[in-house]
Structure formats: C-alpha cells, structure tokens
Amino acid sequence: MSGDQLQSQIGPVRRRRGSFRRLLRKPVGVGALVVLLALVALGLLEPVLAARSPVASDLAYTNTPVGTSGWLLGGDQFGRDIWSRILGSINVSLISALIGAGVGMIVGTVCGLIAGYVGRRTDAITSWVFNLLIAFPALVLVIVLYPVVGGTYQGMMAIFGIFLSTGIFRLVRNMVIIVRNELYVDAARVSGLSDLRIVGRHVLFAVRGPIIIASAFLASSAIGVQAGLAFLGLGSTQVPSFGAMINDAFLNLYRDPLQLVWPAGFLAVLAGALVLLGNAYRDVLAAPQTVARRQPAKAVRSTPNTAPVVGDHDALLSVRDLRVAYPMVDGSRREVVRGVSFDIRPGEILGLVGESGSGKSQTAFSVLGLLPRDAEVSAAALLLQGRSLTGLDRNGMRAVRRDLVSYIPQEPMANLDPAFTVGSQLVEGLRGRFSKQDAVTAVKRILARVGIPEPDRTFDSYPYQISGGMAQRVLIAGAVLATPKLLIADEPTTALDVTVQAEILDLLRDLQTEYGMGVLLVTHNFGVVADLCDRVAVMRDGELVEQGDVAQIFRDAEHPYTRELVGSILDEDTVRDDVPAQVEEHR
Amino acid sequence: MVVFLAKRAGAGIVLVFVVTFLAFLLTYGADIPVARNILGPSAAESDVALLEARLGLDQPVLVQYWSWLTSAFGGDLGRSYFTSEPVSAAMASRLPVTMSVVVVGCALMLVISCVLGVWSAVRGGWLDTVLQWVTTLTYVLPTIVLGIVMVFVFAIWLRVLPAIGYTSLTESPGLWLASVILPALVLAIHGVAGLAAQVRGSLVDELGKEYVRTLRSRGLSEPSIVLKHALRNAASPALTVFSIQFITLFGSSLFIEKIFALPGYGTYTYNSVVQGDLPAMMGVTLFSVLLVVVINLLVDIANGWVNPKARVA
C-alpha cells in the first residue's frame, strides 16, 4: 500500500482541505490576520520607519508631546522616541513568539512522536516528565533561571517554550497512538515504507490543524510573558520591549498617561490578534456544533385546528394527532412523528412497536415532556386522566412527572447519577411529600419489593458498585416509587442479559397488576409484546400504521409491515444488534 | 482513597526533589560570580576566593546540594548573600501578602467561572455567545495591561480603592480586602476565560446525559438537577483545569505585585535573581514546588469527594 492510499484513509485529513479559504470568510479571522500581518510589516520595516534607535536618548526631547516633528508618538521621560521603541518592541515580541512557540512545537512534537511510537516505558517516562512540566509554575522557574541564561530574553523564551510544549506533546502522542493502531488494522506495516516514516508523516499531516491553532495561543502567551518579565525589569535596557515601555510609562503615569496607552495598546492588539486568529481557525476546523439538549422542551402546543379534535376523557392517556419535528441545519424542518393518535385505558399495557427511527421513543418522550429543547411538539389533544397536558408550563409538567407519569429507561447504568448513592437519588424523588425518615423507609421497602436481595446495602451503594440487572431493578423502583398512574418504559429489557430480561418482564407484570398502572411499553420486540401487552400499536416512519388487541394483531394483521414484524418474531434473537433508539437517532 | 492520596503525596515528594535538584544544578552550576558580585569589582582576587570558600561555593555542586537539602529538612534555607537575612524568615514574612492575593484571586476565579459557566450552559443562545466573547476579550488582554487598566479605573479615576500597598489582615480586615481585591480581581479575570469555558463545556456534556433525563422524569426541580447533580459530575475535569490555573495565577502574581507595589514574593524573587542571591532563589523554587504539591493534593481530595469512583482508585 502506498503512502498516498494510506493518507486517504485517515479521515479527518480530507475535510480540512480549503480550511484556510474558509478562514478568510470569517470576519474575525480576516480581521485578526490583517492586524497581525500589518504588525509584522511594521516590524520588518523598522529600519525604514524608525526615526532613530529605540534605545538612544536625547534629553532635549524628554517627554516631548505627540506629533513633534520627527517624534511621531513623542518622547518618554528619558528622551527616547516612543514610535521607534514601539517598532523595536514589535520585533522583540515577534522574536519571543517565534522562540517560545517554536521551541514548544519542536520539543512537543518530537517527544510526542517518540513517546507514542516507542510506547511502553519510554512513553510512561516521557508522559510523566511532561505531567511534571504542566504541574510546575513555569514563570517562577523562568525567573529563577534568569541569571543562568545570561539575562537574555531569547534564553528565557527558550526555557518558557519547553513549558509551552506540554499541550503539543499530548496532542501528537495521542494521535500517534491512534494512527499506529489504524496502521495495524490496515496491515500497512507490510509495505516498504518504514514505520516511523509512515507514522510521522501521517501524524504530522493529521495534527497540523490543531498544532497551528495551539501555536497561535503559545505565541500569544510567549509575548505576554516576555512583556511581563521586561515589566519586572528582567532584561537588558538595550532591548526595547513593551514590558519595559509599560514600566517606564507607569512610573511616569501622573505626568503623561498617554505614554502608557501606546505600548499597552500595541501589546494588547498583538497578543489579542493571535488569540482571535487561533479561535477563528479552531471554529473553522470544528465540526458543525450540535445543539445539546440541556432543558426539557417547552410544553406541547395545541395544534391550531378549526374543528377541535376531542380526546377520550375516560382514557388514562389520550393522544390525538401528535406531531414532533426538528429544525435541520439547512433551515428545513424534519417531522419525525406525524399525526399519531392512541389511547391507554387505566390498567392497560400498550406496546408501541417499531424499528429504530420509527418515532416510538419520540412519542413516549412527548408524553413525558422530555424531548430536547429544539423539538417542536404539537398535538390536537394530549389528555392525562382527562386533563390536558398541552400548554402546561415547565412546573406544571414537572408536577405531572412527579405525581402521575414515570419512566423506565433503556440503559440502566447510564441512567443513574454516578456521583450519588442509589438510595439518595431515589429519596430525592419523594422530597416534599414525605419526611426524610419516611422517604428512606419507603425507598428501602420498594427496593426489597423489586427483588433486590440486600436493600440496605444497595441503598448505600454507588451505581458503579451494582450490576446492570440490579441497576434496572433500582430504576424500576424509582419509577413505581411515587405510585404513578402511567408508566412509560422505553425498551426496558434491551440492554440486559437474556436471563435477566425474563425476570424483569415478570417484575413489570407483577407491579403493573399490583399498582393498577397503565403502561406504555416502547419496544422493537414482538416477543415482549406477546408476553406482556394487552394492545399493540405499530409505528413506521413516524406514523401509526396499525393498532389493535395483541391477540387480533397476531392472528391477522392488516398492514403488511405488521405481518412482517410478527413474522420476524420466530427468527429474531431477543438481543438487539442494532443501535439502541436514542433521541439523536433522527438527526 | 488513603492509598491513592499516599501515592500522590509520594509522587509530590519526588517532584520536590527533582525540581529543587535541577534548579540547584542549573543555578549553582552556572558559574555566577557570586563572591565577586558581593565584594564588588575592586576587591582583591584573594578575598573573592576566601569568600567563595566560606560560602562553600568552591565545593562540587552535588556536595553543596546535599548540604542545602539536609539543612532544608530542618527548616534552614540558608541566609541571603546580600542582606544576611535568613531565607526562611524572609519567605515567611512575605507569604501572607502573596497568598492573600492568590487565594482571594482563586476564590473569585472559581465563583465567577461557575456562575458564568452554569449560566451560559443552561441558558445557551445569545447569552452563551456574549459570554464567550467577553471571556475571550478578557483573555487576550495581557495580565499587566489588565492590571494597569484596573489601577487606572478604580484607583486613579474612580478613587474607590487604594492603588498600591498592603494592609495585613490582622491589622484591619476591611483595609486588607481593599488592598488585595484589585490585584486578586486582575488575576481572577485572566483565569476565568479558561475555567468558565471548562465548566460550561462539561456541564453541557453532563446535561445531555441520560441520567439527567431520568432525574427529570422523577419530577426533580431544575435547580437541583443542574446545581446538585450535573454540576457535581462536571466538577472533575473542571478541578483539573482549576489546579493548572492556580499555578498560572501564582506565577502571574509576581507581575501583579509590582503593579500594586505589594511586598510579596514578586519583588523578593526579582531582587534575588538580579543579584544572583542563590539561597533566596532556591527558597522561592522550593516554596513554589511545595505549593504545587499541596494544591494538587487538595484537588485530589476534592476530586474524591465529588467523584466516588476516584475514592477507590
């Protein structure tokens, strides 16, 4: 396999093509780039633009005001030309940036390549050393070593650069490990190219974007630190520096505050342009940002309708013409639930069946009011015990979830808060209705009820200390704790071992009879439906294609899709092998 | 947890040895003409040699390090070459100043970062964008520029706070706070950009997790979900960033002390390196590395508190 073929296999690389052109379309990026180039040009043109040496003083011009002939920005308290000193300082800053960021990049890249490539002990030792570097107060060591480097700013920047290399080191090392593993898979090692060359080439190609970004930040901090050191007075007076200028102007503050503005302003603009350029380039490289679901969605809207559809007021849950849509990146809307209507009577178990992406989970979460924030949900009627849920505000929905509807999730381990004990999470759900003591007793009783052998011990356990089957029992306990009228279970057995699945289904059936709850059971598995449900509703592509009694559907389903699903029960493994239905499945 | 902390403390002690040894090697081994600097250019060569012998500078570096290390264990860091003041006493007298600024700065940084981070994670939208811009802008201003702007605005223009100087806490808590609040704020603002972004980022991640949805399904209140559950889970990565920011902040305090004329480690460090006062330089090095070790241990303990899994590691 040739190097070029290999390159084409490393995915992220191709997407970066043209990133510089995209950067030029971002106003902040262009602005920062223009400012930076202008400053570099000023620095390069210093011999032409500077009227005199930046360190030469002419006492006749002490504190000369701005605009004096030949003294563009005036003179400082030692009679030095501020404009010439600014130009000189730009060059010193740029050299500092080059040394600091350069040393950081070279040290970080080389050590990262070696650590990631050689691995094992070399990696362990190198990583340990770099962790030390992160932990150490770099500035203190740079200052302490000031006499060692002969007091030159170049020497101090070289030392500082070593401390700056830590981020680059991690980046390169991790990338080497990824690429190396990919190469094993590709069996590219058989090719004539030597390993190190392949790894080096691919890694450097893959990390060049992040390295460019990082070096902008490194350059900015090198400039800031150099100025800070010069401000402290560490450095030769023969070297112009923003820091030294700021210090001089600071001492002269009451006499001529304007003298402070020039170095502080140029320093801020130079360091800022680098950071903003890095930021803009990072935005260009970053994938389009996904909208995180941070809050429960706004309440379900009523569908504007001239002839109002009335739900069944006697049903426990009555849903009419439920619609869920998401705005897409290109500005269009995508409807993932399209006009779904069904009822659940008190004490009835309705199975909601369909493939991944059919909209069944979306339907369930609409009832709970727990869809992502950007979901647009509407319904002609959404009645719970005859009371409309449409138009309820956040607190109203919260009360519904607290008192009437509860939820059993699919992945037990992901649905317990890892930072709190099992018991304390459950107790919290009862807060406000029971005293602390009563709530604890109630939770322990429920834990025993759902078949947990040592409720006291589980109560005090953290989620990572219990098994998946136990965790699912805990979640079921959490769901029935508040004696809800409606239980919504989203694939409650899918993530469990086959043996545990049957136990959990039995438990659900027992609890349903005991509490007389209505259940909305979301599943893809007709076996579970046959086992547990009274009625079944089949969804496909966001629509309900058929619903009816379980016995009738099994006997003679009308819709071909239902027949297909019923037929597949015979050969289907009860353990699902596709991706579990997630809220994101529709994106 | 105890085993874990003991391991971390052990690693910290190794760090102290490694860093002080390297610093000693580099500074004492750099052939800085210490005796010549003390006696001045006109002193006789024989006097210089005599003084070098008296200071032990004629001995091999390793021997010198060993004697420094053994007396350091007893709390004796030697005396300044130039003032003869014991280094440990000088460090102790300056400790309250620097630590006041750094600790108040860190507390401010933590509070501001959490408020901004949580706010922008929960609200999102335009507020998120505005906060990101504000934090970026404060970040791009170099610390010294920010410090000078603050002196200008609050002390010279508005005249609400003293521009310079330090009042000790025991003397007057009010004046103490007034004297450290501005420098602390400058340090805090610079650190806020990174920390707030971290808090926001990990909180957004946590709020997208399934357990949050399940907690909501039990009807928990939004403040409890965000502040008690999600924030606690988001704290681990934020704590790591905090410990790194603390160290950066301590370094920056050396610059800031000069702007506000605070008699802390900044001036002490500056004077010692300019003069080549080796014992004082080693004292500062030792103190900073000890500070790092202590902070990292505290962060580990805090991490064990927020993250039960870390307790068994």
Image: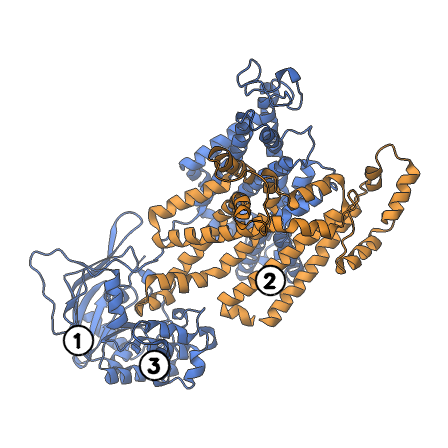
Q: Nearer the viewer, mark 3 or mark 1?
A: 3
3 and 1 marks on the same chain = yes
In which quadrant of the rendered image does the N terminus of chain B lie?
bottom right
Q: Residue at x 41, y 72 (%)?
A: A413
2 and 1 marks on the same chain = no
Label drawn at residue B297: 2
Nearest the eye: A226 or A167 = A226
For disc 2, the chain is B
Colour assigned to chain A in the rendering is blue
The residue carrying pointer 1 sits among few (fewer than 14), some (14 to 19) or many (20 or more) residues within 10 Å by Cα, namely: some
Local secondary structure at mark 3:
helix
Local secondary structure at mark 1:
loop
Q: Which residue is mark 1?
A: A557
Amino acid, disc 3: Ala
Amino acid, disc 2: Leu
Q: Which residue is mark 3?
A: A442
The residue carrying pointer 3 sits among few (fewer than 14), some (14 to 19) or many (20 or more) residues within 10 Å by Cα, namely: some
Nearest the eye: A314 or A427 = A427
Q: Provide residue B69's location: percent of width, then percent of height.
A: 78, 57
